[in-house]
Amino acid sequence: MHRGDLADLTAFVAVADELSFRAAAARVGVTPSALSHAMRQLEERLGVRLLHRTTRSVALTDQGRRLLERLRPAIAQIAGALEDLDQERRRPFGRLRIHASAGAAAAAIAPVWDRFLATYPDVHLELQVDDAPVDIVAKGFDAAIGIRERAAVDMVAVRVTGPMKVTVVGAPAYFARRPAPRTPDDLAHHSCIQYRWGDGVFVWPFQRNGQSRRISVRGPVTVNSPGLAVRAAVRRRGRSYDQASWSACLRTGCRPTRDTSFIIPGTGRSRRRCARSSTCSAPAASRLSPKG
């Protein structure tokens, strides 16, 4: 089909409805002369005459009438589809697929999803929580939420949280047998819960006085859930003191208990450190709207 056929066929339906080039031109938003020229070009491409014209009247030929009968339902369906899209833009509905890291899901999505679903009751939110990198277009996601460093270069990234807090935690029973670390370097002498982050093991970042460093820790357990990491540190407190563990957890992804001590290396006081913020990334030139 010629790329201009759809527009010309829509104009033809307008002329057939109005039986007036002036009225049809006003309906489709062009001048009468431009509309008349478009009809002549359409007839030349099709090789048939669709309209009888005089200076005072317009009428359909037999071929034009038969074409109109076939076109009306199709044009109505196209118009209906475009109207439905406009309604979706004004009132979102359908499925919204989001890929998020565990920390980002806890920090950016969980606190607001009740309000979001109450505001948009026709939206079905599908959330996949995974710390592994993902091609959100290839996997059919509408957006992804995670740290900015993992956003692809061709994605549009928007910051959705402030800096999140990271704390090093351990069980009191563990401290009863081992001294609390005073600096990040002291972690080399402790048994730590390791965190599987995508294809690799998470390296613990620390920052003090504007200086940043990353510490690789060792330990007998590796998990890929912040909640499990904290539980592992707490539950292992009474078994073997040599195997009691430390864990780094996002403040927004876990809840402290009285069985867990929070210590910041280098201070010995219960304080929190800033970590990375989360961003929402989506394909360039797209809008974050649910899919049907």
Image: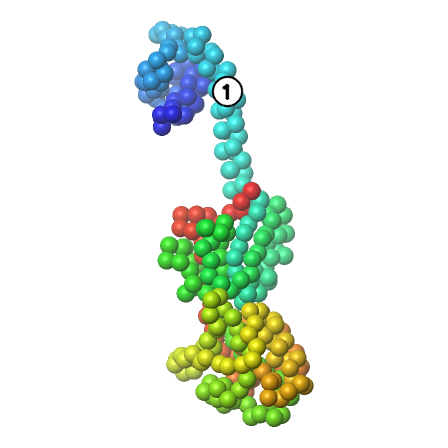
Q: Is residue 172 visible?
A: no
**Residue at figure coordinates x 47%, y 16% from the top left:** 68
In x, y percent, where is residue 52? 39, 7
**Residue at figure coordinates x 47%, y 12% from the top left:** 66
Query: Residue 45 falls in which quadrant of the image?
Result: top left
Quadrant showing the C terminus: top right
Quadrant showing the N terminus: top left
Position of residue 156 in the picture relative to residue 119 (left or right): left
Q: Nearer the viewer, residue 156 or 199?
A: 199
The crowd level at tag 1 (other Cα within 10 Å; few <14, some 14-19, many 20+) is few
Q: Nearer the viewer, residue 225 or 288?
A: 225
**Residue at figure coordinates x 59%, y 88% from the top left:** 242
**Most distant residue in the front direction:** 220
Q: Number of labelled discs? A: 1
Q: Nearer the viewer, residue 215 or 221?
A: 221
Q: Amino acid at mark 1?
A: Arg
Color scheme of the displayed model: rainbow
**Residue at figure coordinates x 39%, y 17% from the top left:** 22
Position of residue 217 in the picture relative to residue 120 (left or right): left
Q: Secondary structure at mark 1?
A: helix
In x, y percent, where is residue 89? 51, 42
In the picture shown, does residue 100 fall above or below 180? above
In x, y percent, where is residue 229? 59, 74
Q: Nearer the viewer, residue 244 or 87?
A: 244
For label 1, the residue is 72
In the picture shown, does residue 93 fall above or below 196? above
In x, y percent, where is residue 126? 58, 53
Q: Is residue 184 visible?
A: yes
